[in-house]
Amino acid sequence: MKDNGIVKVLVKTESSYLLSLKKDPETRSDGLLEHLGGHIDPEECCFEALLREVTEEEASGKLAAVLRKEKPVPHELFVAVHGRQEKHYLYRVTISKELASQLQADERESYGFQFVAAQYLESEQGLHTIEHKLTWKTRQIHNALEKYE
């Protein structure tokens, strides 16, 4: 079945999340943190889109290999974007800090990866502390997650 919307993967280590420093010089999001992922193309299901996006954004292929092996089930939620509800498929995967340190950001997509302590992304107070470092959509995703969980 083909889907539409956005796929994102929340990559967690023992005590932190791995985020990408967005490379998009034409927007205000340039240099801000976001989860790996992106739009689902019309011919794709959400998992195919996730694998494609992760392959584009993480150059070593190690994260895509973990996702293929684990086949996580997405959490579906709707995020308010420009006055409409945008469907998001959020995948979660936990990897070792050692493996996370081996992942390589594709320089065409990202300025690099950064670890963010889990406490900042898993609570409203934590999000408020670092919201200036996150893309607008990443903040919206985490705000929506709090309502669903």
Image (cartoon, helix red, strand yellow):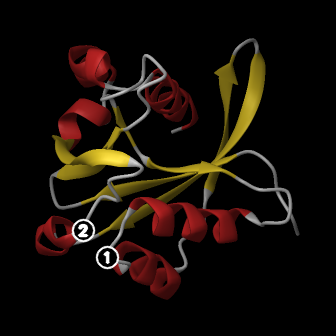
Q: Is residue 130 left or right of residue 147?
A: left
- What's the amino acid at mark 2? Leu
- Write down the quadrant of residue 147 in the picture: top right
x and y percent of residue 109 in the render?
Answer: 41, 49
Quadrant occupied by the N terminus: bottom right
At 48% from the left edge and 69% from the top edge, which residue is drawn? 55
117 w.r.t. 43: above or below: above
At 44% from the left edge and 32% from the top edge, which residue is drawn? 24
Pointer 2: what residue?
103
x and y percent of residue 97 in the render?
Answer: 13, 67
Q: Is residue 16 left or right of residue 34?
A: left
Q: Is mark 1 on a helix, strand or loop?
A: loop
At 74% from the left edge and 45% from the top edge, which residue is drawn? 5
Mark closest to the chain's N terminus, 1 or 2 = 1
Q: Do the residues labelled 1 and 2 touch (CB within 8 Å)?
A: yes
At 42% from the left edge and 59% from the top edge, which residue is drawn? 57
Pointer 1: what residue?
60
- Write down the quadrant of residue 98 in the picture: bottom left
**Identity of the residue furthest to the bottom in this view:** 69
